[in-house]
Image: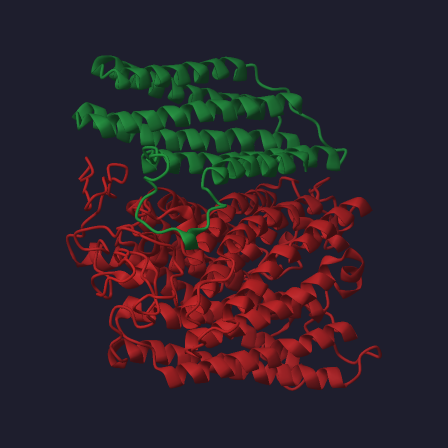
Chain colours: A red, B green
Amino acid sequence: MGEATLESHEGVGSAEFPEVELYHATNWWTKYVFSQDAKIIAVQYSITALAAGFVALVLSWLMRLQLGFPDSLSIIDQNQYYQVITMHGMIMVVYLLTALLLGGFGNYLIPLMVGARDMVFPYLNMLSYWTYLLAVLVLLASFFVPGGPTGAGWTLYPPQAILSGTPGRDFGIVLMLVSLIIFIIGFTMGGLNYVVTVLQARAQGMTMMRLPLTVWGIFTASVMALLAFPALFVGAVMLLFDRLLGTSFFMPALVEMGQRSDYNGGSPILFQHMFWFFGHPEVYIVALPAFGIVSDLIATHARRNIFGYRMMVWAILIIGFLSFVVWAHHMYVSGMHPYFGFFFATTTLIIAVPTAIKVYNWILTLWRGDIHLTVPMLFAIGFIVTFVNGGLTGLFLGNAVVDVPLSDTMFVVAHFHMVMGVAPILVIFGAIYHWYPKVTGRMLNEPLGKFHFWVTFIGSYLVFFPLHYLGLMGVPRRYYAIGEMDALPLSTGELNQLVSVAAFVVGFAQLVFVFNMVWSLRNGTPSGGNPWRATTLEWQTPETPPSHGNWGKDLPVVHRWAYGYSVPGAAQDFLPQNQPPVVQFTRGAEP
Amino acid sequence: MTILFLLVATLATVAIWWLSQQRLAEKPWLESGPVDSLRAPVPRRMPAAKVGLGVFLAVVSALFALFASAYAMRMHMASDWSSPPLPWLLWPNTGVLFLSSAAMGWAQAAARRRQIGHLRTGLVMGAASAVLFLAGQVVACQQLATAGFYMATNPANAFFYLLTGLHALHLLGGLVALGRASARVWRGTAMAPMVLSVDLCASYWHFLLLVWLAVFALLLHG
């Protein structure tokens, strides 16, 4: 295999496209557990990430119980509240969203969509998953150590992250930092695969500009993640040194429990720079794959080619670049030179331009399209609405002067949950309904899916919309209990109760989704190879679910771009990317 | 902060250069056909492992650049910074790493010319001098510690151990890869994958030499 079997397709030499060396599993363990097949790894990643996500969902319930009914229920105390907040945030952002969108969807879709047999480094890919699993286990282990998980907040700001007043100071924070370091090492292995597979293993005829936008999104996000995660790595390693070895990278001289600590001269701001140099690109590491996926869902279910494909690609690239020069807008209240604030506010607001281009293009794709309100389409439309909502509040918060009074209120919570919580999760659900037939060969149940969508969509608006209002009223975030406050009317408490009830309903609706996934595995309608009549390569595999090696004997040859929907004069309303062009009949010659 | 922006700018330049090769202004909806043979022939693709190494080196560069920027920022953020006297051993160590890199370059050339004997000598010399370098770094750290410059006493000391340690870890990882490549050479597998893995090791070695020079310069500057 090392010499790369070169196949030649009719009329086209393919010497430039040596095949990937395929690893063949020899027994059950190497086939389904320690598998090097990207499709299995994708499922492993997805299940692990969703499981972690459910832990985080339960944590959010605990939080909402406390916030909605601070006096009547006392399930968690102050310390546990902070631990719950911290773990909820970190799990959702890193261990669910990043892992699921890149490790899950990336692994499944990249090789299939670019027409490759597998990732280019399958062994590294396998290691990536097991490293990720280790990171999750280390993180979850912190629930069981003395003192519990860290309660530092998901941003882990020093000095409080490692001071004795913070819960989980002894073991929790150490496990959190170690887990992050492991995660980043694991992600780097996976990320190398995603990037190099797109660069090197594309099928014949698949130019970059013929890639589906899903691949563009995941590809750009992977490049960004590879460059942004090192910043978190640096921050985590240095914070770990401060905690364990007594260095003073981030820890200033301070008095702790009445005693002067040994720390001296460290800079908490330095940590914030490191954290947000990772943290802001992270928002787009999650958002770009979602952008890409939603573009493909909309084009497929509206039977229209994506409006402004080139603009969409350019917008993805511009957003990717800009997201590296806006990080300090998370630090407006940390104290910075006003010119810095001006610079970062400007770059932040400029991001609105490419994102708005994307939103307009989605809407214009839908315009006069043949819209099928399938479950994936419902989720895609739900995403657009939610993303616009979250994006608009981003314009408020991106302005330094507006951010200062709103900072640390529920308004910020509402903003980032809308834009990077609800919006990408809606896309993830839509994508699961869309690609589940390819992964399993069966459709998910549609009535259950619609129920899931409407409860999730309306419910999450009931959860997060009131938070904007609460934030504008001045309800602070991160407070265990607000108590009686003259500045806040009693109605804020009632609104908080509504939010909590809605959060429970939304949470339980996810059980319907889990049931649907498990039930449809055996009882779903068989889907056939291409139930949505889509054009992209993953729907054209000879077998569904695709077998090891994806393509049978011959790799696909790509003849056109990914959005051949409703092409005038074509026999069907979609032209698969690998379908050879029909020989043109001259005028007058009857077929 | 300047280093951060420089890093972003450098990576953006590379990205823009690469993107400029991708014909992003193409109108894919107007074209059909399997290949771009109508235009210039597609250049022969590099082996995936080479591209993979290139991407990995970009990640490692980002990592070290971020540490360097943390170093530069921390230096000016408080008045407690005092650089340790650098152990003199670092100078001969640097020479050894140069030797190591040169030996790997020699092995690479030998591999390309299919001279197995020279290749083996080059690999052994490269590995041996890398191990010598690592041993030297350990001794240098010990010298610094015995002189009383502990990690917790000053951030400059902490950065010294952190940066040299991180570089050493990367070199250790390289030695594992080199071990696998050497096993290939001694087992005598097919020539093409052997040349490739020696190529990759040599590139990694040159890269780590550059990183060390940058780290050394940073420590000297501090």
In the image, residue B125 above or below residue A63: above
Residue A449 pos. (x, y %): 41, 81
Q: Residue at x 36, y 55 (%)?
A: A107
Q: Residue at x 58, y 52 (%)?
A: A319
Q: Is residue A438 visible?
A: yes
Q: Is residue A590 left or right of residue A146?
A: left
Q: Quadrant of the C terminus of chain A?
A: bottom left
The quarter holding residue A416 reads bottom right
Q: Residue at x 67, y 81 (%)?
A: A496
The quarter holding residue A105 reads bottom left
Q: Is residue B93 left or right of residue A573?
A: right
Q: Is residue A186 visible?
A: no
| Identity of the residue furthest to the right in this view | A486
In the image, residue A489 above or below residue B209: below
Q: Quadrant of the N terminus of chain A?
A: top left
| Tally of marks | 0
From the viewer's side, name the closer residue of A63 and A190. Answer: A190
Residue B98 pos. (x, y %): 45, 15
Residue A429 pos. (x, y %): 44, 71
In the image, residue A490 above or below residue B95: below
Residue A75 pos. (x, y %): 58, 79
Q: Is residue A483 left or right of residue A275?
A: right
Q: Is residue A520 left or right of residue A499?
A: left
| Identity of the residue furthest to the front in this view | A588
